[in-house]
Amino acid sequence: QVQLIESGGGLVQTGESLRLSCTVSGRTFSTYAMGWFRQAPEKEREFVAAINRNGRTTYYTDSVKGRFTISRDNAKNTVYLQMNSLKPEDTAVYYCAADIRFSIPTKLDDFDYWGQGTQVTVSS
């Protein structure tokens, strides 16, 4: 059974940084493309960033370009989301997701496995 465990969320002030981690178990990590999504209260879950299996290709939603960086360490079965210059509108539950079918998935339905989420709160 595949499990995804996120960590690293918390409460920060505007302009500060956080790094989220997501560790995957249950299958060879390097066979997955990975992504991060977020869901704010009363809003739909939205795509944030994705990375392909070998880590050489990344993709971001426009609102986080230049501030967030997705990366992965296949030796540690972990994907990261470095979030800099955080804004109150970044406040959400952040989810990592894994996909075995697509090279660089970006849609909710592309992903096969999901973590339980970690809360990120940015105060103004």
Image (spheres, grey):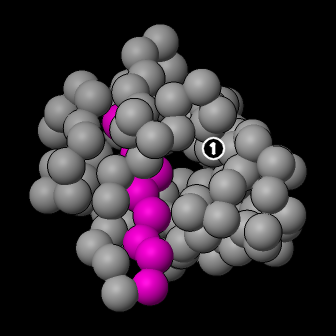
Helix, strand or loop at mark 1:
strand
Residue 35 is one of the magenta-drawn residues: yes
Position above or below: 93 against 73: below
Residue 120 shown left or right of residue 93 in the figure: right
Q: Position of residue 5 (x, y in %)?
A: 59, 67
The quarter in which the C terminus is drawn is bottom right
Closer to the camera in the image, 84 or 114: 84
Give the quadrant of the N terminus: bottom left
Give the dominant element type of the magenta stretch: helix, strand or loop. strand
Q: Would you place residue 45 above or below residue 85 in this image?
A: below
- Residue 53 visible? The answer is no
Magenta span of residues = 33-41
Vertical comparison of 111 with 82: above or below: below
Amino acid carrying mark 1 in the image: Leu
The image shows residue 58 at horizontal and vertical percentages of 43, 23
- Neighbour tally class for label 1: few under 14, some 14-19, many 20 plus, Cα within 10 Å: many
Name the residue at 60% across, 69% down.
91
Residue that carries the numbered disc 1 in the rendered image: 81
Residue 62 percent across, percent down from the top left: 39, 34
In the image, 22 versus 95, the foreground residue is: 95
Residue beneath the point at 51% across and 30% down = 65
Q: Is residue 109 left or right of residue 31?
A: left
**Front position in the image: 14 or 101:** 14
